[in-house]
């Protein structure tokens, strides 16, 4: 939206380039963190073109190279003081975490800190210095037009947020907010805001209806109306974003666009969080994605892009706090979707709308001995038909434990109707939406081919040798044990 839009309500003009986009945040507080290649494979499979990292992980930035995915990197809060006090430290950070990766990795923004005013207030006095130092390093590298700089803020810094027209920022922070807004205005950057209707709803003691928080349709008499502007609000998200617009206007800044750097809904909570459910998380995120991609804008600025990053890609099981803190993800760490988003009309974004096209494959960093044990289990007690892996059969090549275990793992996963836990194998397998079929080797589940479900016993291989007919797929210099044929025949007889 390069066109400058003028609104009759106020002399406010906001310009934003392009349509709104949906991105995802990628956290790392995960006990079994997927490797960079698995993360990028999931992003590609889900057609995710925008990601935000909470740091500048070197391995992940390398894996994102040449993908075209737009990446927002972050200066973690624990590095903020050093960068805010030293131009040289900021320049070194940019050299190491940005210049070393562009243009192969498409870095488009830098978040300097996260919710600094509310989580690290002692660093607030140097926040703007840190932003300026990072930007100066980009200018020196001629990257300032390509890469924008800002700092995400919690929406809790907005006081008296309803009606939106009377909202204002906590005036304690004016010495930080005013120079920061001047910077954002002069560089064409966005105010980054974290918007969580879940918390607004939860803390309202019943004042905010659940439907209003979840973007569910409301009858006209249930819509919230700003008595000063007569604007109608059908959801909490728009009301919070407009409150931020009005709060900036209160400080005489009327042309800074807003980007929502975090928003989402938890899929599970403890006894005090009854509305943290899979159904509500699905409803919120599906409606949010549709709302943003339709370029709906807000009542104050209809049609103006409010690009949004969903919190988050994976559940983070290592996060402290209530149960909900561990359950904001769209996916489990193994790549299985937590739920299927309802995204009719939202294009190809988030292909987990068609989760029947998922496959189980080996992890790229899996230990070969563990793969061998898992393969033995799958082709033995797991009762997988491993005959396509025999010499001369379509899936014999490539003759190695990684390729053969991938076939066996997927065959078991499909046979078990992709039930939870059926693609784990002691942590050496992961779910993907990329079809692993190759040449004449067609994997179960590909193009509608699917194994028949049977009643299995354990969903993971045992490390010990079990009784029964075990397949012996051993790889010594590429040699495939020919006795497998005899073993399979004996199994069939038994």
Image (spheres, rainbow, N blue to C red):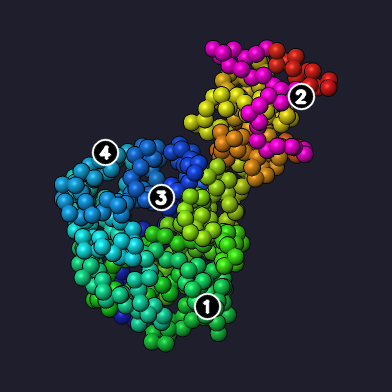
Residue at left offset 23%, top offset 67%:
176
- Residue under numbered circle 1: 205
N-terminal label among 2 and 1: 1
Mark 4 vs mark 1: give the one in front: 1
N-terminal label among 3 and 4: 3
Q: Report the span colored magenta.
A: 454-482
Marks 2 and 1, how far apart at CA: 59 Å
Marks 3 and 1, how far apart at CA: 34 Å
**Residue 456 in magenta stretch:** yes
- Residue under numbered circle 3: 51
Q: How crowded is mark 4: few (under 14 residues within 10 Å), some or many (20 or more)?
A: some
179 or 68: nearer the viewer = 179
N-terminal label among 3 and 2: 3
Q: What element carries label 2?
A: loop
Residue 99, image x and y in percent? Answer: 25, 41
N-terminal label among 2 and 4: 4
Marks 3 and 4, how far apart at CA: 19 Å
Q: Which mark is residue 100?
A: 4
Locate residue 26 relative to residue 369 in the image: left or right: left
Residue at left offset 57%, top offset 49%:
337
Q: Quadrant of residue 472?
A: top right
Residue 110, image x and y in percent? Answer: 30, 52
Instruction: From the image, give the main secondary structure of the stretch colored magenta.
Output: loop
Q: Are marks 3 and 4 in contact (CB under 8 Å)?
A: no
Q: Quadrant of the C terminus?
A: top right
Mark 2 vs mark 4: give the one in front: 2
469 or 224: nearer the viewer = 469
Residue at left offset 56%, top offset 66%:
273
């Amino acid at each position: 939206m390069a066109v400058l839009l003028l609104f009759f309500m106020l002399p406010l003009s906001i310009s934003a380039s392009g349509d709104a986009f949906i991105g995802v945040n990628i956290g790392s507080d995960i006990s079994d963190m997927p490797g960079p290649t698995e993360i990028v494979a999931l992003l590609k499979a889900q057609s995710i073109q925008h990601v935000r990292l909470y740091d500048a992980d070197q391995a992940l930035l390398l894996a994102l190279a040449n993908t075209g995915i737009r990446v927002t990197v972050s200066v973690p809060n624990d590095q903020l003081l050093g960068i805010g006090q030293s131009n040289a430290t900021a320049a070194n950070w940019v050299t190491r975490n940005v210049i070393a990766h562009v243009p192969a990795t498409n870095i488009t923004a830098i978040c300097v800190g996260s919710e600094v005013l509310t989580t690290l207030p002692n660093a607030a006095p140097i926040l703007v210095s840190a932003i300026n130092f990072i930007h100066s390093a980009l200018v020196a590298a001629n990257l300032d037009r390509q890469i924008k700089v800002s700092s995400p803020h919690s929406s809790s810094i907005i006081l008296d947020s309803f009606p939106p027209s009377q909202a204002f920022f906590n005036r304690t922070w004016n010495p930080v907010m005013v120079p920061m807004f001047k910077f954002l205005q002069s560089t064409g950057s966005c105010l980054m805001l974290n918007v969580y209707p879940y918390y607004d709803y939860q803390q309202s003691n019943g004042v905010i209806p659940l439907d209003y928080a979840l973007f569910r349709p409301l009858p006209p008499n249930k819509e919230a109306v700003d008595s000063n502007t007569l604007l109608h609000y059908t959801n909490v998200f728009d009301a919070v974003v407009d409150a931020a617009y009005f709060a900036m206007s209160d400080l005489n800044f009327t042309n800074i666009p807003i980007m929502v750097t975090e928003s989402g809904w938890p899929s599970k909570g403890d006894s005090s969080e009854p509305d943290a459910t899979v159904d509500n998380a699905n409803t919120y995120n599906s409606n949010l994605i549709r709302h943003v991609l339709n370029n709906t804008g807000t009542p104050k600025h209809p049609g103006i892009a409010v690009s949004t990053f969903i919190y988050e890609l994976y559940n983070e099981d290592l996060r402290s706090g209530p149960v909900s803190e561990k359950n904001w993800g769209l996916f489990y760490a193994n790549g299985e979707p937590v739920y299927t988003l309802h995204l009719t009309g939202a294009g190809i974004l988030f292909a987990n709308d068609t989760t029947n096209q998922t496959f189980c494959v080996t992890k790229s960093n899996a230990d070969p001995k563990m793969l061998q044990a898992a393969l033995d289990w799958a082709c033995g007690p797991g009762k997988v038909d491993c005959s396509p892996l025999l010499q001369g059969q379509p899936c014999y090549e490539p003759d190695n434990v990684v390729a053969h275990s991938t076939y066996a793992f997927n065959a078991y996963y499909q046979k078990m109707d992709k039930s939870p836990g059926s693609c784990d194998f002691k942590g050496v397998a992961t779910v993907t939406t990329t079809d692993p079929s190759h040449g004449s080797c067609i994997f179960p589940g590909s193009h509608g081919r699917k194994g028949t479900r049977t009643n299995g016993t354990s969903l993971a291989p045992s490390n010990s040798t079990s009784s029964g007919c075990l397949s012996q797929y051993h790889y010594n210099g590429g040699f495939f044990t020919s006795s497998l044929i005899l073993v399979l025949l004996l199994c069939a007889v038994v």
